[in-house]
Amino acid sequence: SSDTPSTPPSMQGLSSTQGGWSLPTQSSSSSSSVPRHNTAEGLGLTEAAGDAGDVLNTSASLQMEEPCGLTPASLKHVRRQREALAEDKKRLEAELALLRSQMKEHVERVANIQVQLKESEERESDLRKEVGVIMEKEEAERNRADKLELLNVKLEETLALREAEIARLRKALEDQRALTQEVCEEDKGYEEVQGL
């Protein structure tokens, strides 16, 4: 990739190891024919290989510290998503709080309505009892009125009979008076005749 450092041309003959770079292995037959100036030159290459290994280790450690597969743009996108989710969470929490408050109000309202309904039922029961008492009183008054009406009719009949009896007695009394007067007049005439 573009992030992997390229191997310098002077180090292309070296092989990489865990701790750095090492010289290519040579057979024992060829090592005896190497001149001394080549040995010094190999020491310099070894130091250079060590420096290159440190650079590679540092680059590898930096790559491991960065998030795998995340670019600055993707990190920014993830950050925006996180902020959007945080805003949605706040909005949902606010809506939940509002719904809880409304539910509490509804529960209180239902409780008040139930209390009012119970009171209304009690008042209705009391009114029914009062209406029952009034109806009983009205029935009693009606019965009493009917009885009084019957008594009134009987009294009127009795009064009519008494009036007829009184009229009959008056007539009899007048007849008796008339008869008594006639008798008295006859007695008086008889006495006058005897006196002559």
Image (cartoon, rainbow, N blue to C red):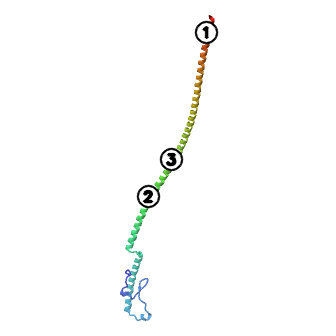
Q: How many marks?
A: 3
Quadrant into which the C terminus falls: top right
Q: Gap between marks 1 and 3, in whole Å?
A: 100 Å
Does the CB distance between marks 2 and 3 fall below 8 Å?
no
Gap between marks 2 and 3 measured at Cα: 32 Å
* Mark closest to the chain's N terminus, 1 or 3: 3
The local secondary structure at tag 3 comes to: helix
Q: Looking at the image, is 100 positioned above or below residue 48? A: above
Query: From mark 2 to mark 1, how far is it between C-alphas?
Result: 131 Å
Q: 93 or 190: nearer the eye? A: 190
**x, y percentage for residue 41?**
37, 89
The residue lying at 41 percent from left, 64 percent from top is 88
Residue 141, by quadrant, is top right
Amino acid tagged 3: Ser
Q: Residue at x 53, y 42 (%)?
A: 131
- The numbered dot on residue 180 is none
Residue type beneath disc 2 = Leu
Say left or right for 128 vs 70. Answer: right
- Give the number of the disc on residue 120: 3
Q: Which SS class for mark 2? A: helix
Measured from the top left, where is residue 5 in percent x and y?
37, 82
Category of crowding for the residue at label 3, using alpha-carbon neighbours closer than 10 angstroms: few (below 14), some (14–19), many (at least 20): few
In this rendering, is residue 3 above or below 169?
Answer: below
Name of the residue lying farthest toward the left: 9
Q: Is residue 137 left or right of residue 99?
A: right
Of tags 1 and 3, which is closer to the observer? 1
Amino acid of disc 1? Gly
Between 190 and 140, the one lying in front of the other is 190
Marked residue nearer the N-terminal end (2 or 3): 2
Disc 2: which residue: 98
Kindly identify which residue carries mark 1. Answer: 189
Residue 27: quarter of image: bottom left
